[in-house]
Image (cartoon, rainbow, N blue to C red):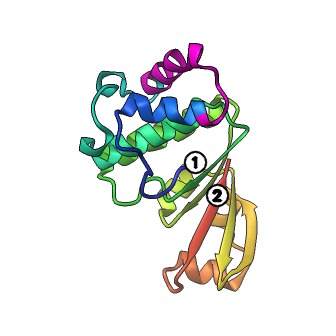
Amino acid sequence: MAFQRPVLLRRSALANVEYGLAVNGVPAGPRERLAREALERVGLSHLADRPSRVLSGGEQQRVALARAWALKPRALFLDEPTASLDPGASAEVERIVREIHAAGTAIVMTTHNLGLARRTGGEILFLHEGRLAERAPTDDFFNHPRTPEARAFLEGELPWTVSSHA
């Protein structure tokens, strides 16, 4: 799982990824190599030794994604992974999420970002007032919403939460 605000230890980026591997039982021998490979995949190998607290918000989110991806999970849960990020950082996080999915990991993501949901989601689960109001393939949800709540939401008339997964 990767949260809206990355939860990182007061250690280097590399040590944060290594820690995730360690607590999941990865032996010490391959740990550093796997952590470095994960940082390379998210474009942060050059910041491996930098303290995580001095990284930008987008870089911190990428470290959190590297830590999760290093474990090669079957499923990855993301909570608002691009919230509070500038457009460049958001695009980079979105690219990484697509790559994680392409590598075989199912992605379940909550987001308020309709563009992100539309670009990355294979299926939309639309929640309204704490219940599932609609479940549909992404194109169907955006082009032909079935429920009044979904139609009102897409027209900007309802507060909302969207969950998508690829």
Q: Nearer the viewer, residue 30 or 92?
A: 30
Under tag 2, what secondary structure? strand
Residue type pointed to by label 2: Ser
Height in image: 157 above or below 65? below
What distance separates the C-alpha of mark 1 from that of mark 2? Answer: 8 Å
Height in image: 143 above or below 70? below
The residue that mark 2 highlights is 164
Q: Residue 98 — which label?
A: none
- Mark 1 burial class by Cα count in 10 Å: few <14, some 14-19, many 20+: many
Q: Which residues are magenta?
A: 23-40
The residue that mark 1 highlights is 120
Q: What residue is rendered at 48% in x and 80% in y?
A: 156
Query: Is disc 1 in contact with disc 2, using a CB cutoff of under 8 Å?
Result: yes
- State the image coordinates of residue 73 (x, y, percent, origin top left): 68, 36
When asked about the image quadrant of residue 147, the answer is: bottom right
Residue 39 is one of the magenta-drawn residues: yes
Q: Nearer the viewer, residue 120 or 96?
A: 96
Left or right of 100, for residue 75? right
Height in image: 111 above or below 41? below
